[in-house]
Amino acid sequence: MDVFLWIAAGVLLMVGVLGSILPVLPGLPLSWLGLLLIKWTDIGATELSWNVLIWTGILTVVVSILDQFMPVWGTRKMGGSRWVVRGAGIGLLFGFFMGPVGILLGPFLGALLAALFEGQRVSASFLQATGAFIGILVGAVFKLMVGGILIWYYFSVLLAL
């Protein structure tokens, strides 16, 4: 039974890290569930503390929530109005259907078009759209860092076998 749990945990961790980049998968929560599965194995019960699970769970929730606000923050930091932020959000929704490239370019193009429709200069529009793009990238980097921490715990407990 332990072998099955270890394999399932490893799959959840990897799929979760992929979900940090791809929008179809939940991302970090899946990775954290993989870590939780390890706790139910014989070796994981002693090697993986509840404190680690609680703190990584809190970190997972915080980063997942921050990831939703990073494009908005980036757009606002670069002077974007409420309409430009909404344009970035709409661009992100459309980008979901176009895969990873759409996820990166969707918010940028949505913010750019919204700023242009607002009547802003091209340079200001481009700057605000760049803020949305940077926000998406910063959120992805945070998720990948936390995913790396979760994978590190997986392998540290696995090597304790």
Image: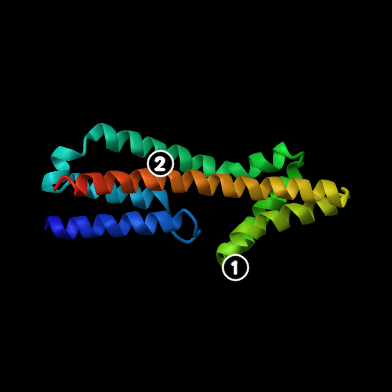
Q: Count of labels shown?
A: 2
Q: Which mark is residue 98?
A: 1
Question: Horizontal placement of 144 versus 154: left or right?
Answer: right
At 83% from the left and 46% from the top, the residue drawn is: 124
Q: Is 69 in front, or is 138?
A: 138
Q: CA distance from mark 2 to mark 1?
A: 26 Å
Residue 63 x, y percent position in the rendering: 47, 40
At 88% from the left and 49% from the top, the residue drawn is: 121
* Residue where numbered disc 2 is placed: 60
Residue located farthest toward the front when viewing the structure as drawn: 159
At 37% from the left and 59% from the top, the residue drawn is: 15
Amino acid at the residue labelled 2: Thr
Say above or below: 109 vs 124.
below
User: Pointer 2 and pointer 1: residues touching (CB < 8 Å)?
Assistant: no
Label 1 neighbourhood size at 10 Å, few (<14), some (14-19), many (20+)?
some
When asked about the image quadrant of residue 77, the answer is top right
At 28% from the left and 43% from the top, the residue drawn is: 153
Amino acid at the residue labelled 1: Met
Residue 30 x, y percent position in the rendering: 36, 52
